[in-house]
Image (cartoon, rainbow, N blue to C red):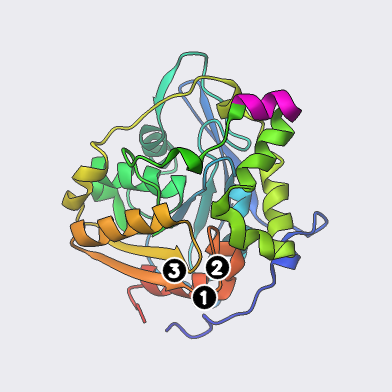
Amino acid sequence: MIRGLSFAVSVDRYARKDRKRTVNLCTARFDSTELFFRRQHPNGKEPISGPPLVLLHPNYLHSEIFTPQLDQLSKFLEVIAVDLRGYGRSSVPAEGERYSHAEDLRKFLDQGDHSVVHMLGLEMGAAVALDFAECFPARVDSMILVNPSAFLYEFPEESFFNVTEALEAGGITEARSRWLARTDYDFTRKNKPVFWFVEQVMAEYQGYHFLCDDYVTWKGNGLDAYGAIETRTLILNGEFCGEDYRRISSYLSTTMKNLTLHEIKASGMLPNVENIQEFNDNVLSFVSGRER
């Protein structure tokens, strides 16, 4: 383990709106799209040489969910947390516009002159990372998939909620509430400071995907093609994450050749804020090539 890797961080620190922020808030522009991102350069005494770590958020959340990682991982390497198109402060697609998160990321990395990166995706962000790694393998040094979703995986109907019904009952606020009331978040809701923080991040979601037809496309071939990905990969599952994410993780672990699977104790869907220390230790050990 890298010396100084163990640290105890309370999520209460990140749940306060008056917290002094030192992270750089930036916007990348290409074509007619703006992608907002948070960036923190290495600021510790023992930086890791190598490419930056790009963080991709879960569905309906945005880059602020990675505040503990921007704060702590940046002691060792450059960390960039991106709001994908339609989320957070990034622009929403034009009406009827077809777009690809993987292609957006390619243009984003080109603009930042990042030829190679470490990539970490959480839930939906993991699906985007897989799509990117399938299409642009030379640009991903290593990949970390946290409770991964995956393109072409069929989630059961009970995993969702009736968006129209929610909007009629209470608008965007009700729809956001029902998303976080799903069984996938049962464990997260038990930790009141953590769940409060998650609710604050979710409250900034403006509801594009609830209100509009989304024409996002996937550049790759989806779940059955991921066995061809040779990128060094780590899957992190929360001990109490949803069963579908465990199924996806299990499938990937049997099809991808260069993959390690690890469980983060005392965590559910969002281990990066539920068990910050263990999560960050595993991420840093992996990207530095010093797995425990």
Task: Estimate the spatial distance between the alpha carbons at disc 2 and disc 3, rounded to whole Å.
Answer: 15 Å
Relative vertical location of residue 170 with respect to residue 95 in this rendering, above or below: below
Task: Estimate the spatial distance between the alpha carbons at disc 2 and disc 1, rounded to whole Å.
Answer: 10 Å
Residue for badge 3: 283
**Residue 107 is drawn in which quadrant?**
top left
User: Which numbered circle lies on residue 267?
Assistant: 2
Q: Pick whichever, 237 or 216, lies toward us.
A: 237
Q: Secondary structure at mark 2?
A: loop
Q: Which residues are magenta?
A: 164-170
**Residue 174 is drawn in which quadrant?**
top right
Q: Crowding at label 2, few (<14), some or many (≥20) Cα neighbours within 10 Å?
A: many
User: Which numbered circle lies on residue 278?
Assistant: 1
Name the amino acid type tagged 2: Ser
Residue 255, percent from left and from top = 19, 56
Q: Crowding at label 3, few (<14), some or many (≥20) Cα neighbours within 10 Å?
A: many
N-terminal of the pair, mark 1 or mark 3, is 1
Task: Estimate the spatial distance between the alpha carbons at disc 1 and disc 3, rounded to whole Å.
Answer: 9 Å
Q: Is residue 114 magenta?
A: no
Report if the CB atoms under discs 2 and 1 are less than 8 Å apart: yes
| Residue situated furthest top in the rendering | 96
Name the amino acid type tagged 1: Glu
User: Which residue is at a point 35% across and 39% down the rendered structure image?
Assistant: 154
User: Which numbered circle lies on residue 222?
Assistant: none
Residue 42, percent from left and from top = 53, 65
